[in-house]
Image (cartoon, rainbow, N blue to C red):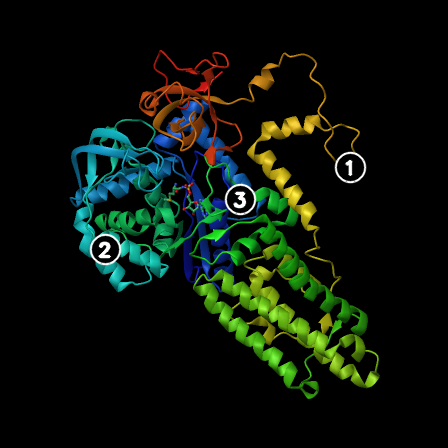
Amino acid sequence: MTANTKPKFYLTTPIYYVNARPHLGHTYTTVVADTIARHKKMCGYDVIFLTGTDEHGQKVERAAKAAGVTPQEFADRISAEYRALWQELDLPFDRFIRTTEPRHERAVQMLCRKAQDRGYIYKGGYEGQYCVFDEMYVDEPLPGNLCPECKRPTERVREENYFFKLSAFQDRLLELYEKQPDFVQPETRRNEVLAFVRGGLRDLSISRTSFKWGIPFPADEKHIFYVWYDALTSYMTGVGYADDEVQFERYWPADLHLVGKEILRFHAVYWPAFLMAADEPLPKRIFAHGWWLFADEKMSKSRGNMQYPQPIARVLGVDALRYFLLREMVFGQDGNFSRDALLTRYNADLANGLGNLASRTLTMIQTYLGGRVPARNPNEENDRDREVAALKETVCEEVSGYYDSYDFSRVLDSIWGLIAEVDKYLVEFQPWVLVKEKSKWGRLETVLYTAYDVLSAVVCLTHPVIPHATQKIWEQLGHSTKLETQSLSQAWWKEHKHPFQIGASEAVFPRVDKKEAFERIEAMEDEIRNPAAAHVAAAGAGAGSPSGSPASPAAPASNKIGIEDFAKVEMRVGVVKSAERVAGADKLLKLLVDIGDEVRQVVAGIAVAYTPEEVIGKKVVVVANLAPRKLRGVESNGMIVAASTGPDGKPVLCTFTEDVPPGARLK
Ligand code: MSP
């Protein structure tokens, strides 16, 4: 075996929680990571791209309990969904780490022991508020004991824990941010981290005893690790920590951790401190990107605005999804997702832009030159040809810088500027006119050579973002190689030997009818979000309806329902965490209800019977899979079950006399 002489590049996505299914937000980070991985490979790096699932913690334990399965079964199911999705979207990670793997347990314990040996871990008492949703201790809750991050109610915890001496690292962390200004990116996020650390650091509790679903503490099994200590260490486990020294030496430290902005503090403050305490090398860079928003709100299960990537990929193709995600959002900032913008970009940039340039160039070479790409002929070149060729060089250079700074929207802007320029150039010189006069065939060859040459560069440069379409165009351009093996740094097209023969051309991005595509995506989204409802709708559509238009649902055979109908209603035990009146509505209370794996906002018509104070702390029954709706402008995600005592009678809440955990399902 020969030694790998390539420089290495190790990058990671966050490892995703298994309490919820993968959605477009998770897909975004994974697509970015995959794009960087593909780009680095084309630049000659030996790349390792890690992703995985974060499977421990109270949130997962509760979600599993509510689903009536063990935490391991629950984790197995969702972790498999993640893998299946990455496979469907062709995101070929090199490592997939699950925090329930035995090798990971060894790694976490080893990192901790090293810090313990160096005196950075001690036992102490903790009493305070804890946010289960964010899995973090909350030193300064908002009024009503709400978490300042997610605004959900926090819980009081009191326990004897192991503490990490985070306070000992304030100066070293500040020195790190100072000496390596690009350790945290982008700059605005770096400033937030600086301000946080300058404000002083308190020691951090890194073990729990109040629940069981976690990695046992070394030599004190009553304690399990705090889920973030466990999760962050997975970045090391993935490349062999405590398992494979040679591999670990080669790939650690990570060159890049990609994270969403909400988990930056864990990565930019806690993680380097954990590593410093164990005397392990620090990652080189942490990049915190923004959020995909939907009508200016973050995507979340409780808001009912989850978007899934599969429908887009199935209707428009994986590349269209990737292109949109990287083009539309400035990496590092928030972006608004809209299906309309997606479809507009698809038709304008992919079908009419790149797709059209490829098909018209190839068709003209086929028809006018018998499919033979001519060699460059400087004698036939004029200033305009040289200008277009020079622009290509400039774009290649500029794009390489944008890729290196992860500025994907600029990468694509710049390339699409070049595409527009070649379109203009073709219209200026009109090959379809040149072909008519033999004396102009020299010019014809030069114009088509120039278009072909730029198209080749465009295809290479865009490959990391839209790998499938570019490979197809590459083959149509007459190559039999894999585009991913092309070196971007050596600008292959400069040395390429013409003439040669092109392949058959075929549209890579067929134009779509916006309305029809919109509806197909929407229908698939609904089906993913709510399989039961989609099932009813499908059953309701008449069999003899070839146009696919919905027919009226068949009349029910009787007023009895089958057990399968009842099973569609997801009823769960909820604990009311907070309650307030809805302004201008006498009957409505706005409640925050803990249903185990999440806290829901539900608006209930019970204000005539209950004051807000009376319902706080009550265990109620929540219909959890009701589509969200707005009552007096306030969003309600679910319904509270109450007995109705006649038109003028007061509603009576359905509750429990025996102890039941929040989230337990009613069957
Ligand atoms: N398990 C932790 C991470 C531990 S890493 C050692 C976690 N998991 S998560 O499932 O909640 O995933 C959060 C990540 O998913 C974000 O940091 C981001 O990368 C991605 N996104 C989730 N929703 C998103 C958007 N709406 N928009 C963009 N990215 C989003 O946190």
Q: Secondary structure at mark 3?
A: helix
Q: Secondary structure at mark 2?
A: helix
- Give whichever of 171, 493 is nearer the camera: 171
From the top left corner, tell me how far across and down residue 312 is, in percent.
60, 46
- Give whichever of 405, 283 is nearer the camera: 405
The residue under the point 64% across, 57% down is 469
Viewer can see residue 118: yes
Kindly identify which numbered label has been placed on residue 547.
1
Ligand 1, image quadrant it occupies: top left
Quadrant of residue 475 within the rendered picture: bottom right
Q: State the residue position of label 2.
A: 173
- Give whichever of 39, 332 is nearer the camera: 332
Q: Amino acid at mark 2?
A: Leu
User: Which is more N-terminal, label 3 or label 1?
Assistant: 3
Q: Amino acid at mark 1?
A: Ser
Q: Amino acid at mark 3?
A: Trp
What distance separates the C-alpha of mark 1 from that of mark 3? 34 Å
Above or below residue 294? Residue 442 is: below
- From the viewer's perspective, is 201 left or right of 332? left
What distance separates the C-alpha of mark 2 from that of mark 1? 64 Å
From the top left corner, tell me how far across and down residue 193 is, in percent.
28, 54
Total count of labels: 3
What distance separates the C-alpha of mark 3 from that of mark 2? 35 Å
